[in-house]
Structures are given as structure tokens and as C-alpha cells.
Amino acid sequence: MTTFFTKSDSPKASPPPAPDVKAFASVPILDLHRQYLQVRSEVLAAIEKVCASQHYILGAEVEGLEREVAAFCGARDAVGCASGTDALWLALAAAGVLPGDQVLTTPFSFFASASAIVRAGARPVFADIDPLTFNLDPAQVKTFLRSSPHDKLGALVPVHLYGQCADMNRLLQVAREFHLSVIEDAAQAIGARWGEQRAGSMGVSAAFSFYPTKNLSAYGEAGLVTTHSPEMAAHLRRLRNHGSSRRYVHEEFGWNSRLDAIQAAILRVKLQYVEEWNDGRRQRAARYDQLFADAGLRSDENSVESSAPVRLPHTAKTAHHVFHQYVVRAYRRDELREFLAARKIATEIYYPIPLHLQPCFVYLGYREGDFPESERAAREVLALPMFPELTEDEQRWVVASIADFYC
């Protein structure tokens, strides 16, 4: 059991800020307007071009986005679709996951990581996370595969959580040993790398989300699947279009998951900036790290056990982290969040309930205690404001406020 250091067992009234720290009326967890000001003219021109063309679904803009994202990720092909959730389902279906199959993934992720498996007719099964990175632990995956019947297990879905790739070297090795297809859930990881390989280029396919909060974000719902296989790409295109490759001829049952041309046009503009924005996120993560160290709150990031009240994110040596979120572990997390909310500093919990404990998954038969690291993370994680335009003064106020709470 971790023993945290703190000088107080209950929150106190907010003390005045340190003299060199500027107080803010509010700090958002994300401010999309600041980004919009940078790209406004280009985005409006792209939208006008689509409106003038009167081609609003699929078409040239979607095809252009597919080529550009495939090249960006180092994949042979890409297929746009209506959402990140649809992207996961399409990837599973095109990989041959069938009703009655099992798919192994992490219990510590957004709901869609498991719900897409159910939508494909399969059964989610879980292995616990690495407590340092929050990603699927290859050792736990191997233990599961060696100790449990897995004749119906057809796929492994590692999630690149918070913008850091899972340990793909080890996971791919395990997948080869047990003859599993690997589908990357890269919804939060556009531009992230594991070694020299980008998210979206390592599995048989990968699913991306362009939800408005993502590092590369649409102005609505949008998603995309990358793959190296021309046959899989063709299958994905049929599946997203009612199972049809020719108008009014349906080779199979698919879904209406076509990508809007306006969203594709917006994403093509913003794709040109995503590397710069990701670098901005990495710089702000490094600044948080230093500010926490200066405040005496920085923990040993190579150990989940710490006497400090805040444990900072750990980046694996092989990973190029793009910090979709900057997530700390915090002692008395919920009280800290209330304290920060009183100062109008926005935070979020990603995610408060592990997937195996969600009410809709009770039929899977899991119970509290089955995945202790995921459950512990759900009790401790707190996402702080993180976006490329976040100012140093705003970050100083966030960290000073956290220090005030633990005084």
C-alpha cells in the first residue's frame, strides 16, 4: 500500500498564490477556439470548396485524406469512416472477427475499445495494465494466454492510451506465438511512435478517432482505419458502405459509416499542423514535469509506489509520446479535483470505472479485484489541462494550486 506524504488530511481554504504566480479566473482542460484562430481562414476555404462542389459524402476530399493519413502513419492504405468507434468495428470485422470469437484487450480504456468487440459479435476478454504506462501489459497478456483456454481468441487489441504506444515489440511477439491478429486502437495516438514505427503501421490494421477533442480533430464525428493490406482496405470500403462495392449491389451486410467530405477537408488542413501541435503538447508535458519538480511534488516516475502526493506520467524509452492527455496519479484525487474546480481549473478522469466493472459487461463474469492495476488507476488518475496553446502562466497556476492543496 502506497504511503503518500501530505501535511494535511483535509482540504483547506485556498491560500493566496505565491507572489510570482499569476492567478487565473479559469483554466480550461481544452480550448479549441485558440486552435481555430490559427487555422480559421484555411478551414473556411476548405469548407467553401466542398460546399461549392456539392459533393458532401466520400469523394475527392475523403480520398485525399486517406492518402495523406496513410503516408503520415507509414501505412499502405487508409479508409475513412464516420467515427472512431466505427473504425474499431470495421477493423475487427475486416480482420475476420466473427460472432462467438473472443478478442483480448485492456480493461482500462474508453468504452468503445470493448463495445466495438461486442458489436462485431465477439466477446471481450481482458488482461491487466502496466501500472507505469497504463497500457496493456505484455506479461499479463502472456499469462492469460498460457493459463486460459483461447481456442476462440482471434485478435488482440492494444490501446495506445493517452498518446503513448503500447509495448508493441513484446505484444507483436506474443501475438505471433499465439497466432493472433493485432488491431491497434490508436484513437488517442495520431503521430505517436514506438521506436521508428508510427501508430497505425504496426498491426494488421489500426483505428483512429478524429473526435473534436483529439490531437487531430474534426468539427464533428470522424474516424479512419489504416492497413498495409489492399484486400483489407477494399473490404473496409465495402463494409462502411452497406457492404457494397458497386451501387445497389451488396456483397455482404455492412453499415452506413461513410465519412463526410466537409470533415475530411477540415482534417486535411489540420493534418499539416499536427506534428507542430504534438510537439507543443510534448513541450507542455515537459514543463509540467519541471514545475512539479520545482514545487517539490515530483515523484520517481519509474515506480508506481511513491511517498509524493502526485505521480507524474511515465514515458517508456522506446515511446514517442504525443500527450493526448497529461495524466497524473493523485493522492485524495477526488478531493483535489473539487479543490481545483473551486478555482475553476478544469480536470477530467479518464476513466473512473474499468471496463470489466461496467454494468453492461456483468455477463462477462468479472468481479472487483480481477484486474487490480486497472482498478487502482481508476481510483487515482487525473487529467490536467493539456493543449498546444496552453500558456506557461496557466500551467504555473495549475501546479501552484495543486501544491496549495497538499500544503
Image: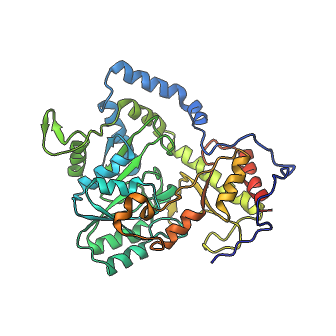
Query: Is residue 57 shown to the viewer in this render?
Result: yes
Quadrant showing the N terminus: bottom right
Find residue 35 and report its horizontal and vertical position in percent.
58, 36
Q: Nearer the viewer, residue 60 or 55?
A: 55
Find residue 44 and report its horizontal and vertical position in percent.
48, 24
Q: Nearer the viewer, residue 262 or 319?
A: 262
Q: Nearer the viewer, residue 360 or 64?
A: 360
Quadrant showing the C terminus: bottom right
Question: In the displayed image of the protein, which residue is found farthest to the top?
Answer: 52
In the visual, does 5 lie left or right of 274? right
Q: Is residue 1 above or below residue 185?
A: below
Look at 64% across and 42% down and name the residue there. 28
Could you tell me how many numbered marks the image carries?
A: 0
Q: Quadrant of residue 197?
A: bottom left
Query: Is residue 315 shown to the viewer in this render?
Result: no
Find residue 77 and report its horizontal and vertical position in percent.
30, 47
Q: Nearer the viewer, residue 62 or 373?
A: 373
Q: Quadrant of residue 205?
A: bottom left
Question: In the displayed image of the protein, which residue is found farthest to the bottom?
Answer: 147
Find residue 30 and report its horizontal and vertical position in percent.
59, 43
In the visual, does 67 lie left or right of 393? left
